[in-house]
Amino acid sequence: MVLSCALLGAGYFGKHYVRLLGEVSGAHLSAVFDPALSSDAFQEIQKVHPGVMRAQTFEEILRDPEIG
């Protein structure tokens, strides 16, 4: 079973969650929402979590049935 997660805020602590979710068996980072996130920072997240979506709004994540 895969637990699909979203990250709300990828600032100081967010980068640690990105790393840790990459190490947890059965966890998958599906989406990130952070209006202040730079393109370069998002590309770094994509290296660890290929296929991660950059959500434009918090509500977009709430509507996603794949994210638990």
Image (spheres, rainbow, N blue to C red):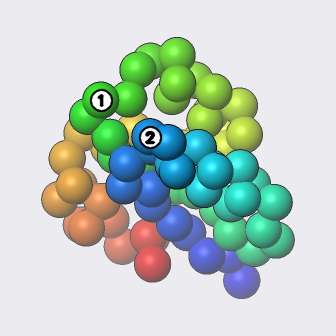
Which residue in the rendered view is the most extreme toward the bottom?
Answer: 1
From this viewpoint, is residue 53 visible?
A: no
Q: Residues within 10 Å of mark 1 (few under 14, many from 20)?
A: few
Kind of residue indicated by mark 1: Ala
Q: Which residue is mark 1?
A: 36
Q: Residue at x 36, y 55 (%)?
A: 8
* Whole-percent x, y for residue 56 in the image: 24, 39
Q: Which label number is shown at residue 19?
A: none
Residue at x-position 26% and y-position 34%: 35
Foreground pick, 59 / 15: 15
Q: Residue 32: image x %, image y %? A: 42, 47
Give left or right: position of 45 versus 5: right
Please name the amino acid that badge 2 sits on. Answer: Gly
* Mark 2: few/some/many CA within 10 Å (<14, 14-19, 20+): few
Q: Residue at x 44, y 18 (%)?
A: 39
What distance separates the C-alpha of mark 1 from that of mark 2?
8 Å
- The answer to whether residue 27 is seen in the rendering is yes
Quarter of the figure with the C terminus: bottom left
User: Which residue, as the protein is rendered here, is positioned at the far top?
Assistant: 40
Spot occupied by residue 43 in the image (x, y as percentages of width and height): 58, 23
Which numbered tag is attached to residue 11? 2
> Hey, which quadrant is residue 67 in on the image?
bottom left
As drawn, 64 above or below 15: below
